[in-house]
Image (cartoon, grey):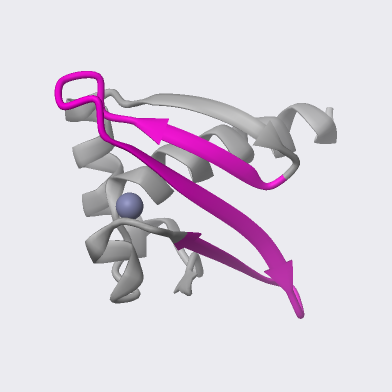
Amino acid sequence: MIQLTTATAIEKAINKARTVKPRVRVNCFGSYSVTNKTTGATYTVTCEKRNGVRLAHCDCKAGMRGQACYHVAAAAHIQLAADKQAAH
Ligand SMILES: [Zn+2]
């Protein structure tokens, strides 16, 4: 599990996501398929909130080690945008 505590914690991953520009597809609430358009590799990212802490999980190598990968950053970005919209 990757803890999404602050934006800076996943800043590097966000920057990578901006470079790679993966395709993010929403499977269902809190579950995303992130595809690298160059390699065609697809990973599944799941997000959940536990005790007010936002947690994410990705099934890529880095994600399995608990590192914030760009798949999580891309999915989290989509979810944060959705949260902002819901707040309006
Ligand atoms: Zn990943």
61 to 72, vertically: above or below = below
The answer to whether 88 appears left or right of 49 in the picture is: right
Q: Nearer the viewer, residue 75 or 45?
A: 45
Closest to the observer, 74 or 11: 74
| Rendering coords of residue 75 (x, y %) | 49, 40
Whether residue 71 is situated above or below residue 34 in the rendered picture: below
Foreground of the two, 82 or 64: 64
Question: Residue at 82% across / 35% down in the picture?
Answer: 87
Kindly identify the residue that appears in the image at 29 percent across and 46 percent down: 70
- Where residue 52 appears, as percent x and y from the top left, is 74, 73
Q: Seen in the image, is 66 located left or right of residue 38?
A: right
Q: Residue at x 69, y 31 (%)?
A: 82
Q: How many badges with numbers are in the image?
A: 0
On the image, the x and y values in percent for residue 54 come to 62, 65
Q: Is residue 44 above or below residue 66?
A: above
- Reply yes or no: does residue 33 show up in magenta: yes
**Place of residue 42 in the rendered image (x, y in percent of width and height, measured from the top left):** 35, 36
- In the picture, which quadrant includes the C terminus? top right
Q: Main secondary structure of the magenta part?
A: strand
Q: Which residues are magenta?
A: 30-57
53 is within the stretch colored magenta = yes
Question: Picture quarter containing residue 62?
Answer: bottom left
Q: Is residue 40 left or right of residue 24?
A: left
